[in-house]
Image (cartoon, rainbow, N blue to C red):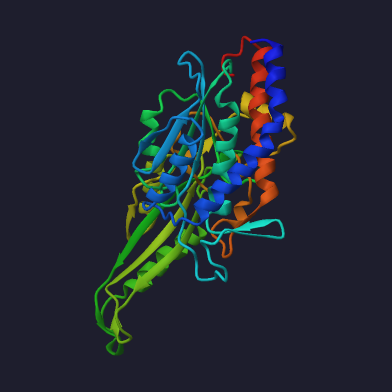
Amino acid sequence: MSLQLIDEILVGDQQLSHLADDALMLLKQLIATPSFSGEEDNTADWIQAFIENRDMSTHRLRNNIWAFNKYYDPQKPTILLNSHHDTVKPNEGYTRDPYLPEERDGKLYGLGSNDAGGCLVSLLAVFRYFYNSPNLCYNLCFAATAEEENTGENGLKAVLPLLGHIDFAIVGEPTQMQLATAEMGCMVLDCTAHGTAGHAARNEGDNALYKAMADIQWFSSFHFPKRSGFMGDIKMTVTEIKAGIQHNIVPSECHFTVDVRLNDCYNVGEVLAIIKNHTISDVFARPGIVKPSCIDQIHPLVRAGIALGRKTYLSPTSSDQGWLDVPSLKMGPGDSARSHMANEYIFVDEIKEGVNIYTNLLKNMVYCLIHNPENNVC
């Protein structure tokens, strides 16, 4: 690859403004189209049509859409650009129509605008920017996937075997365009404490609620012995509880749910074994456990981001990054604090900034090959 080619890519910067405007148009359509996890067929249709109407071919499995750059070369490394187009359901605190994409005071309101529509359309804009470049030192695969919010089996996990060899990935989640170089894993536990029903007035029965309370107290106070130097402690939080059928009957069962955030010191089996050894309730892990992930600070992708003034940090939330077995970086426009909030929004300028920073991140990878041709990672 010549430096002249690099100059030609840099000259293309004037395209970015148009691509960002086009991305914003798509985002508004996605906001206006309900896409709860497992019910994303309509947004998948919009994304597929958007890509194909711009002369790019797509592939589809259920509600997942993906595409490769025009000059895909299996001899080159491949970067996955991934984000999701499903959303949670709007919470009761909304005072705006969650499906009305409304711009006001520089903000675009709407369900999924921040998590993770802004990331998805920005990554797609960047994919379009590089799509026709004939001599990239890497391939690009853009994937808009489903069922991220419910950790479903029919999202990125189902698509990965069809994408071919992936060398590393950028996962689009709202990080204020900083570099989440690690994230905690996530496991959800359904727990049941058992007792014996009886009449509350006669001190009969064995109260399952009290047994559950003992276990809940343990979950709230236990600290795992091993502490990750980067991820910190495993975090366990009881988030739901249900027991009893009426006021004068001692409950024979109490059901509660525990959210467990995993670090890199224990595998899932070890964590479950410790929990079961310290509790009397029946404990079952739900399917779809997301493992913790981490990318080396010296990875070329991280170095390229740091060169752009981006900061690295540990993300406490989990994402589709947990399905990947390759180095991955979580990064995107928007703010994680706005995810799932009432009257969700993203700043329009955040999308423009995202398109620019993503583009320059990948350009830095091009420079990496020019100046370090022996580095086959980039």
In which image quadrant can residue 190 be found?
bottom left
Residue in the image at 33% along x and 86% along y: 247
Vertically, is 194 above or below 304?
below
Disc count in the image? Answer: 0
**Is 54 in front, or is 31?**
54
Q: Quadrant of the N terminus?
A: top right
**Is 127 in front, or is 228?**
127
Residue in the image at 50% along x and 71% along y: 92
Q: As drawn, is 71 to the left or to the right of 190?
A: right
Name, please, the residue furthest toward the bottom. Answer: 201
Image coordinates for residue 270, horizontal then vertical, percent = 40, 42
In which image quadrant can residue 130 be found?
top right
Vertically, is 253 above or below 27?
below
Q: Quadrant of the C terminus?
A: top right
Image coordinates for residue 206, horizontal then vertical, percent = 28, 75
Q: As drawn, is 3 to the left or to the right of 163?
A: right
Image coordinates for residue 369, horizontal then vertical, percent = 64, 15
Image coordinates for residue 43, horizontal then vertical, percent = 44, 49
Q: As drawn, is 143 to the left or to the right of 136?
A: left
**Is 44 in front, or is 317?**
44
| Residue 133 showing in the rendered view | yes
Vertically, is 50 above or below 8?
below
| Residue 292 showing in the rendered view | no
In which image quadrant can residue 208 be found?
bottom left
Vertically, is 251 above or below 301?
below
